Image (cartoon, rainbow, N blue to C red):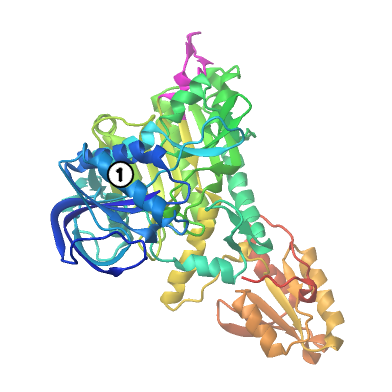
Amino acid sequence: MRILLLHADFIEYQPISKEIQAAEDIPSKSSNKIDEVIVALIAVEKDDDESIIDEVGNELKTYGEMIKCDSLLIYPYAHLSSDLATHTAAQSILNSIEKKTRDLFKIVNRAPFGWTKSFNLKIKGHPLAEHAKTIQKKTVGKTNTESTAESIALKSEEVLKSSWYVLVPEGNLVPMNEYTFEKDSALRKLADYELSKKRTVVEVPPHVKLMKRLAIADYEPSSDGGNMRYYPKGRLMKSLIETYVTRMIHEYGGIEVETPVMYDSNHPSIHSYFNRFPARQYNIQSDNKQLFLRFAACFGQFLMAKDFQISYKQLPLKLYELTRYSFRREKSGELVGLRRLRAFSMPDCHAFCRDMDQAKEEFVKRFELSLRVIEGLGLSSNDDVDMVIRFTSDFYEQNKEFIKTFAARLEKPILVEMWKERFFYFIVKWEFNFIDSLGKAAALSTDQIDVENGERYKIEFVDSDGQKKYPIILHNSPSGAIERVMFALLEKTDKDANTGKVPALPLWLSHTQVRVIPVASKHLEFSEKILDELGKNNIRADIDDREFSVAKKIREAESEWIHFILVIGDKEVGGNELVVRERVAKSQYGIALDNLIKKVKLETSDKPYLPLNLPAYLSKRPLIMV
């Protein structure tokens, strides 16, 4: 069942005509207006039955209590789902919901079933005024089945009360309602996104079209929503980003490990942490165990660290894993392209620290690491990302100067969420967010100071006094999910195009860095020698040997965003220079092959290299239909 709850100043609706033959009879087609009401738009789906009625009623009642409204309108709304129940089943279930909620609300109305209706409503402007919910029938006593669970922390996150500020570079904490945002600034959009809590996607963001057109990735229709297929170009791009981020964490001192993707929900340490982490899980019943798919690398790394013998001299101890994959059962209406997925690759680095002083010192080091990683990936910390930092009021009062250093270092204002009390396992958390063209934020780099899980998992170290103590744990992903990096880079190219720049991926992430185009078959042998020389120097190059016109080959190379295009004719075969078309610079010039190689290698010198993962000859490649 799909439900969209709207807290409205009013709704006015009028039945127009019967939409189905089985539409219920109504006394009149007159207009109906209801003031100060919860409008529950409900789509009943195929698997729904009477077993979910109590849960639906409780969900509606909980929402009503949160927003302090005791008037409800049940509104049949088939447009929320493409997997609808039969008319008879849907009407029966809606009648049962109406009967159930009459005991839970002061006023309950129901719009007629099976009618086309016109309606006009005004939604209130507070953060909880729009709330989407999916409710599924419980599966009991089955093996190898999947269901969804929500942690207590996630439910707390939906209703937690906090205060919002802007931390300016000078160190002042300005209440958000007193801060003057620059018009249409990314920080303003981020603030609107955080306060509205509107995560549902109603438009297709530009990167979705780009990832398809460039044959990077696409939706996998035979899988669960939020699981993608990556074509060769996308797989290479992912691999390069993974390699780069992993290398940067190795240089920082991260010790790479590997842990399982599923865990026992009833394990003592995991069970309690399960309800402290704000995420939705995939649950699997296997044999006699209730398992869940991991939504982070925390479980495996903490259980591993518990079995280590650790001295204070070895702290901070930094464990790292690139999870392929982490799984989160995100709401279907929030899934879009590479921005929000249900299966994603997350570089996850935990640092086990001796005390709060060491934790804060390491927190700053990892902040610097994240800045280097973000910049290295091709995103600007000044122009492309905005920061949110969240902490408890107690932590802020005790660490004001520490908090101020982040805005000073970033040299731009930071959005601040302050909690009166701690809801989760961490006392402070920061995030770099990329804002797309639709105003939706996606968190990239992040870190947290965790004060609970050392003790929860019984991770111990021997301190200088010989006593066993629990470490403070930091949770850092210096890049965020690999897929979100790809999302941000593609969205950035769209923004560039809208400002007159040439859209392009960084050269080191481009699938083909140099395209060689022979004018005729007699130029193929010389073109192959160039291709061979480029490959020897770790430059990804291919050759368009198809029987198309040169103009068509150039157009296709441009449409694939290839940075350097070499057209090989009689002049090039008999001369000392090649004519190169440089796409981003919009220029064409003569250059010796050695100098072109130096130019490409200089631009990619500090980045990883992987060879081409498609045939070098375009005639040998399959045509990917997207």
Which residue is the site of mark 1?
A: 97
Q: Residue at x 25, y 39 (%)?
A: 61
Q: Which of the 4 quarters of the picture holds residue 428?
A: top left
In the image, residue 457 lies in the stretch drawn in magenta: yes
Q: Which of the 4 quarters of the picture holds residue 582?
A: bottom right
User: On the rendered image, what quadrant is the C terminus found in?
Assistant: bottom right
Residue 532: x, y in percent?
A: 82, 70
Residue 25: x, y in percent?
A: 26, 60
Task: Identify whether 517 is placed above or below 427.
Answer: below
Viewer-proximal residue, 495 or 582? 495
Q: Which of the 4 quarters of the picture holds residue 59?
A: top left
How many numbered discs, if any?
1
Task: Identify whether 419 is placed above or below 22.
Answer: above
Q: Residue at x 16, y 43 (%)?
A: 70
Q: Residues within 10 Å of mark 1 (few under 14, many from 20)?
A: many
Which amino acid type is shown beneath numbered disc 1? Ile
Task: Identify whether 21 is placed above or below 141.
Answer: below
For the question of whether residue 169 can be seen, the reply is no
Residue 418 horizontal side relative to residue 208, left or right: left
For the question of whether residue 483 can be seen, the reply is yes
- The magenta segment is 452-473
In the image, residue 592 lies in the stretch drawn in magenta: no
